[in-house]
Image: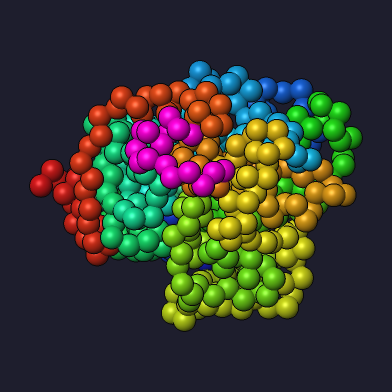
Amino acid sequence: MEIRYQSTRDLNAKKVTASQAILQGLSPDGGLYVPTEIPAIKTPLTELAKLSYQELAFKILKPYLPDFSDQELQTCLTAAYGSNFDTSTIAPLTEHANAFYLELFHGPTIAFKDLALQLLPHLMTVAARKNKLKAEIVILTATSGDTGKAAMEGFADVPQTKIIVFYPKDGVSPIQEKQMLTQKGQNTSVFGIAGNFDQAQTNVKNIFNDQEFKDYLAQHNYRFSSANSINIGRLLPQIVYYFYAYGQLLNAGKITAGQAINFSVPTGNFGDILAGYYAKKMGLPIKKLICASNKNHVLTDFFNSGTYDKQRPFYVTSSPSMDILVSSNLERLLYYLSDRNPQTTRSLMEQLQHTGNYQISAAMKTKLTDFAAGFADENQTAAEIKRVFAVDGTTLDPHTAVASYVAQEWLHDTPTVIIATASPYKFPQAVWSALTTIPLADGQQALAELQKLIKLPYPPAIKQLLTATVKDRQSIAPTKMKSAIVDVLFDH
Ligand SMILES: N[C@@H](CCOP(=O)(O)O)C(=O)O
């Protein structure tokens, strides 16, 4: 049976094709699309290890995208993973300080989101053609720093699309903000909101579910989709690099085929680590998926207690992309923990919405053993940057440092891959202050000072940023997101 997609909350189990799920982004009932089955990988790991990133991506993604022809998928992959990455290996694995780091920051926006967002626009374009879609697709995106830029970069000037991004105006790094404010493309718009990421994400989801608004837009030939990991088309491409990391370990003789390894994943919206969970369910030998959080450790508490409680202070940290208290993709995990029970999933999500918390059953809790969890506070994050730098001069960004810190407990008896999600140049102030007590200038000077210290060449994204024209920041209240969308679409 070919894979189709159904909502985590769909009591009638209505199914859509992969291309329809990608176009819709979110299920109409507010749930998230999940595949009707997780396909087992049949090719031996030793064979997968011989493939290029593009070839591997084809093998992994093809069963999930049965309504894409081989030719269509190949074309999308060739366009997505080429000279837009600064290394032909796309996602190199390096070894430092007794651990392996999967470098996912070699794409055009120097964050791991590029691995999915360089592909999604191509998948979306094919999906629109396949479904004979005439409407213009409006990609609504909430970001805590990385997704927004990567999504705009991916969708810039893609025909039949407009992309509108909302970010917390005081909750991203200056470089992340500058990356977004220098984005080119007639179809891109970005707004800073006077609120946090959770408000941006909740409002985006509410707008998605506002039938009256959707009907109004439909009359004007617009429909919504998403570039966040709530869109299954954003999540699936992320499965690939878990297999790719494993292959690189095999090729380097660091493990033998079948040997189980850990992945430590800096986690906010739970999309990246959920892709690892899919990889494990497909047959990749993973011992623990280590969910690494920052000071906003709602997920650590959930894994350790079975209770999810978002009612707590929201901290702005040095790892802003993880400053999240409502972790969207956990909904998909709840669906699996409940043996794919949409009723249970819906009820837990409704509890979260109405009371701010929920507790999973003892039976669901027993299934959390695929995961381990921990967090690093601000001092621990800075100390980890300093520790790894002292070992061999490698500079971690604060998100990677969180995962690296949390991984230390797990890497003694099992090879452990730390997902390195961003370049340190996205967070010069945080990295600098972790490495030295000398005060750092603001703006471009900060980058130059950091480069002198860490001696890492600027990636192309940073070189471009130095001379790019910066647009004025448009700040709005979170309650004005809908009117901002209307302004963009109707050019008010
Ligand atoms: N960390 C993210 C937040 C959104 O996550 P996503 O994976 O759902 O797009 C960011 O950098 O914006």
On the image, the x and y values in percent for residue 315 come to 46, 64
According to the image, what is the colour scheme of the structure? Answer: rainbow
Q: Which residue is farthest left?
A: 492
* Residue appearing at x 16%, y 49% in the figure: 487
Q: Nearer the viewer, residue 452 or 83?
A: 452
Residues in magenta?
435-450
Q: Is residue 437 magenta?
A: yes
On the image, the x and y values in percent for residue 279 come to 70, 45
Q: Relative to residue 204, is residue 438 depicted above or below?
A: above
Q: Is residue 379 left or right of residue 311?
A: right
Asked whether residue 268 is in view, the answer is yes
Location of residue 429 by image quarter? top left
Q: Is residue 368 magenta?
A: no
Location of residue 69 by image quarter? top right
Asked whether residue 66 is in view, the answer is no
On the image, the x and y values in percent for residue 402 come to 61, 52
Location of residue 203 by image quarter? bottom left
